Image (cartoon, rainbow, N blue to C red):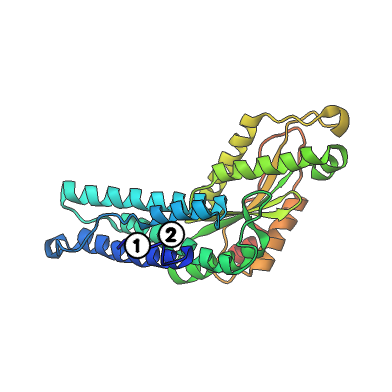
Amino acid sequence: MPVDYKNNNGWEALLLVLDEHCQWFHNVIEYLFYAHLYNPSKNIVKPSSFAQWILHAKEDDTVQLEIIEKLTAVHNELFKISDQLVNAMEDTGNRPSHASYKNFVTIFEEFISHIRRLEKNFISESRGYDPFTGLRNKKMLKDDVRRELHRLARQGRNFCLAIASIDNFDSIRNTAHKDEVDGYIKLVASLIKLSIRSFDDAYYMGNDEFVLCLKQADLSGGIAALERLRRELERQKITLDPIRSNYQNPLSMSCCIAEPVDGDDVDELLNNLRNDLKNTDKDSNDTVLKYRELSPLQRFVREGV
């Protein structure tokens, strides 16, 4: 069904996109598992309404570029996975594995979640994004993490939460020009975007603090994301000015990561991560991200099992 932008504003058109994709998703699932009963009149051709909506959103400049990029990345991943499943089924005649099915469902739910979030953010003035870094803002963090905790409780979908900060930030801020400090923060934000997947979330909390919510990831998967961030930072080879900063080492970061469990409290979890990060010894000559595997709360939970 084509989206009529002349008679609908962009947000009403977005609801039509949502309906069309829900119908397409159910048709694909039916085709994958019940091809012998599948009604050829049902259309599994990928809908084009989202691409139309993106063009419209860019033209009227009502949606931040960061939101458009995030939505587009998730949408592209959704179509990529659907193509893989349909092609595999047509080549082999076999239904998808349970793992493949769950992956498809999860990405679809992420797409729907982003659409719903966009609706909610549009109602609020902040729209959910920090204009300075392009990451999600701290006002949205608690609701987003609580949603992941609910998914964990309902469906057992693990995720990781990490706090990252720039090493020696107070000294950098006291000795460097404001433009330089802002440049470091924006650089780290851009590298975080490169290091996480399309359906992960990252937040700028202010000053030197960033939070990463890494979905569908256990602790080893979360650490892998931090390693990607470390490598990206190393490639930049940003060296602090030794004359003004008294440091001859490259710009570096430290990070603390935890794999939440059912029943964790968001505020307590974040505070424990911050405390672990604060109490971790930092070697200013080391560019490697340092992390503690578990927050104190997580260690307590696991030791009590």
Q: Amino acid at mark 1?
A: His
Please report contact status of discs 1 and 2: CB closer than 8 Å, yes or no: yes
Q: Which SS class for mark 1?
A: helix
Residue at mark 2 = 111
Residue 299 locus on image (x, y percent): 63, 60
Name the image quarter holding residue 63: bottom right
Q: Is residue 264 above or below residue 253?
A: below
Q: Is residue 250 left or right of residue 176?
A: left
From this viewpoint, which residue is outermost toward the front?
Answer: 6
Q: How many marks?
A: 2
Position in image of residue 195 (x %, y %): 55, 43
Residue type for callout 2: Phe
Q: In the image, which disc is placed on residue 21?
A: 1
Measuring from the top left, give residue 262's x and y in whole percent.
54, 69
Q: Which one is nearer the viewer's eye here, 212 or 152? A: 212
Q: Residue at x 63, y 66 (%)?
A: 142
Mark 1 surroundings within 10 Å by alpha-carbon count, few (fewer than 14), some (14 through 19), many (20 or more): many
Residue 256 left/right relative to 10: right
Residue at 40% across / 57% down in the picture?
Answer: 107
Query: Upstream in the sequence, badge 1 or badge 2?
Result: 1
Q: Position of residue 208 (x, y in %)?
A: 74, 48
Looking at the rendered image, the quarter that the N terminus falls into is bottom left
Element under disc 2: helix
Circle nearer the viewer, 1 or 2: 1
Q: Look at 26% across and 62% down and name the residue there.
A: 29
